[in-house]
Image (tube, helix red, strand yellow):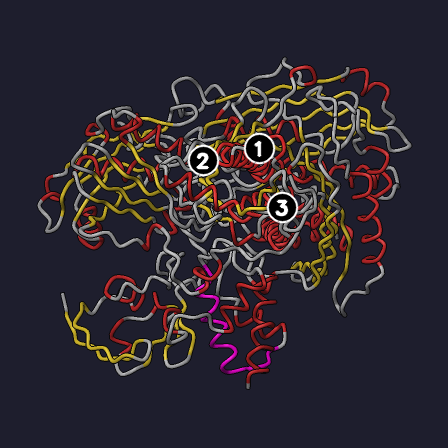
Amino acid sequence: MNKLTVHFTLNQQSIRLETLAARSLLDVLREDFALTGAKDSCGGDGECGACTVLLDGEAVNACMVLISQVEGRHVLTIEGLTPDGSLHPIQNAYVQAGAIQCGYCTPGMVMATKALLDHTPQPDETQIREALAGNLCRCTGYTKIVQAVQFAAAELHHDN
Amino acid sequence: MTTNTSVIGKPEIRKDAASKATGKAQYTADLQPEHAAYAVLVRSPHHHADILSIDKTLALQQPGVIAVITAEDIPGLKTFGLIPDQPALAINEVRHIGEPVVLVVATDKASAQYGASKVVMEYKKLEAVLDPIEALSDVSPIVHPAGNLLSQFNVDSGDLDSGFSKADIVFEETFTTQRVAPAYMEMETSLASYHPDGTISVWVSSQEPFIDRARIAATLDLEVEKVHVLSTVIGGAFGGKEDSSLAIITAIATWITKGTVRMVNNRSESFVAHPKRHPVKIHLKIGAMHDGTIIALDGKVWLNTGAYASYGPAVGSLLTEMVAGPYNIPNVTIETKVVYTHTPYSGAMRGFGSPQAHFAIESAIDMLAERLKMDAVEIRRKNILQTGDTLPTRVHLNETALGLEPILQQASAAVERLRKVKAKPGKHSGVGLALAMQSMGLGNGIPDNSNHRLEWLPDGRVLIHLGAADLGQGLVTVAEQITAEALGLPFNQIVTSPFNTHAVPDGGVVCASRMTYLVGNAMIAGARLLIQELIDQAATLLNQPKDQITYACGRITLPDGNTLSASEFTSRAAEKGNPILVEASACFPYPEATTPQHLPIGMPHVKFLFGAQVARVEVDAELGIVEVTDLVAIHDPGKVINRLGAEGQIESGVVMGIGYALYEDMNLKSNNQWINNFTEYLLPTSLDVPANLEIQMLEYPEADGPYGAKGLAEICTVPTAPAIANAVYNAIGVRVKDLPITPEKLYQASQIRS
């Protein structure tokens, strides 16, 4: 099986990794770095968004990214959202809004929210719903998740 | 005991939220044990086949493969279940696509998958029966030797024939509902470790870990004490995790290889090999008077329970109780057949038969109203249950939290308001209403208790040894709030231990809309014992008369008026090795005097929840696309313990109901394979939620509920689909009687109409 060496930045740290070429970014994050915040809920088919991470600031399904594709790029996972592991305003908004039940979709939702608010600091409700449409949740009915994004947008805007 | 409610009803933030938001929360598949092997299943590719041979040789030669296991390797019982018809690994025959046949254990996932591909299977395909009505015919292929009719339930009250003979109008309709996946985000997973002392630890993502433990022990021919079942964070369940299969299979792999083994399903396995909501056919014959009074109902129900029983019989019996809906109908006969077929098995799922029953009755009531030229609200007002009415099970409705009448009142106001909203250009708008009832508890004759422990820690905090796991819905938060209230302590002074069958008593299966009620009552009972114990200890230590010592809010007051913190005594008790630890138990009430005893075990239910939902839709008649623009959900959960959590349940139930109404259908495709992925099985997304979702909670206090609470988790998904179906009819005059309401069905129906 083909091996390759890939260099990338993972949560601000430079990484040099020798690995099998056929692996997904999700498998590498979970198995090699014990970064288990990104989840698998669809079997690696890119259908659920539970493994959403940021690749050069864009939300991607980590299960759909081959490890070779991250060469020279920046990967940000839920674990790297704040340097000290404290709650980022987006995470705090999810907590306060009651947007977390089983929580399995939450890391992916938070990262999708981060990508949205980085690009569109003051989204309207339609923009929020569209930005999260690739992230499935079965517990919350999405209402409080949308509210969390609105809270986060207000909080981050206020901070700026 | 404090009487003010300083914690109840508050939107306290669940304590696991931050760890979930940061990704630190570890679900079973996130645990990182050393040297864990990985197991995968070779599953049946056929609906029905004899297994002619299984050749393990080649698979065992593959690098990394540790073991290749079949049914004959299982040391103890080879089948399990409520009705133990389900083999952990198939024995000689497969009865549905996806059935586990061979278990391959290897050092890692890729090796296990490769090894599995090298198991050589030889099958003889047999004729399969997929339809429950066909399965009941004399010439049907046989699913199980005892017959394809798994169970039958009959209830009757009054005199059906005389009811129909008096009726001014009699009509009949047939409704069908589809197979639906619970689709919890965390797929089935288990992790098990063998210990050199001959015990085994099994991490499960389960609603019924004590039942899992018993089944694992029986499968491995072990004493129950040698099996530890543990839970970490659970990623949703919705009834589907009342299913021991993957935990049992992981335990088998671990026991045989004497190591640590992990299993994680992929989504396609989750679809085909774990419980679904039953596809159901319901035929209703209704007799009514010109004034709208319904006087007779004859219901016939067929549940397709699939290849194995799972909780099918229990779903069938509860559905039977719900067929007449929340209406007082004097003459009722209902017959329900739960039928085996060669399809993936159905079992428990949120609502447990009630969503199917309500789709039928609530559609039929609207159809009756139209025939009688009556208003949908008015016909319901004429027939809704009142306290003292008799249900088809002959239970006299004895509700203290009587919510139905005011619920209908609020629903009526919502209907009026939404009817005035004009449709967008090119769209047809319609408003629909549905009522719902949902039983609480497991049913008469089934042990229905919940046991926990409370411990007053040396530092004054209180630890709940909760005998049940939080599935994500917020059980722990509810238990902590009620405990805090009962002890007059702040919410943050209550903590809960992780679940482990060796450390906690049996809290019962987390199901049946009963956990807030049962766990809450248990916590209140336990808190009383804690306070008693604290006062006893203080009296002994300080040599004071115990009847003159009082307790409030974490402090005791002595006869001289001095007060001392509880921790003064809890710390001393702990130092002496005798911590203040009490049992906290509650039992669901089935009063013998008022509970009819003529029905099978599990029937009847005696306590009920009520609700209504009003949907406004806009339909694009050309494309057949339905948009739910507004939904008003009116529920009476009794006193709300945690507002954020209660709203979250309703928002969730409504969206699950929208999926049931419009999108979700685990169908057999033209290539003879089941839909088994989220590309073809459409879960509602953030774009499918009504723009206006309004929640109205009535909060009539339940006399014997904890601080007046009842339950909520299931009923909030029950009325959604019929409300939408009624709204679609109101919008475009097309009545869809088989869920889901797809564009194809609307198109076909409108073609027939025009």
Q: Nearer the viewer, mark 1 or mark 2?
A: 2
Q: Is residue A148 magenta?
A: no
Horizontal side, residue B251 vs residue B277: left or right: left
> Do labels 1 and 2 touch, CB within 8 Å?
no
| Residue at 50% in and 26% down | B339
Q: Which mark is residue B753?
A: none
Q: Residues within 10 Å of mark 1 (few under 14, many from 20)?
A: many
Q: Residues within 10 Å of mark 3 (few under 14, many from 20)?
A: many
| Residue at 41% in and 30% down | B308
- Quarter that holds the N terminus of chain B: top right
Circle 3 residue: B717
| First of labels 1, 2 by sequence position | 1
Q: Residue furthest bottom?
A: A160
Residue B370 location, x and y as percent?
83, 41
Residue A46, placed above or below residue B743: below
Q: Secondary structure at mark 1?
A: helix
* Amino acid type, label 3: Thr
| First of labels 3, 1 by sequence position | 1
How many angstroms separate mark 1 from mark 2 (CA)? 13 Å
User: Which chain is indicated by disc 1?
Assistant: B
Circle 2 residue: B581
Q: Is residue A120 magenta?
A: yes
Residue bounds of the magenta highlight = A105-123
Judging depth in this view, the residue of B396 and B539 nearest the camera is B539
* Amino acid type, label 1: Ala
- Residue B399 image-quadrant placement: top right
Residue B621 location, x and y as percent?
71, 60
* Amino acid type, label 2: Leu
Q: Are marks 1 and 2 on the same chain?
A: yes
- Residue B13 image-quadrant placement: bottom right
Q: Residue furthest top?
A: B598
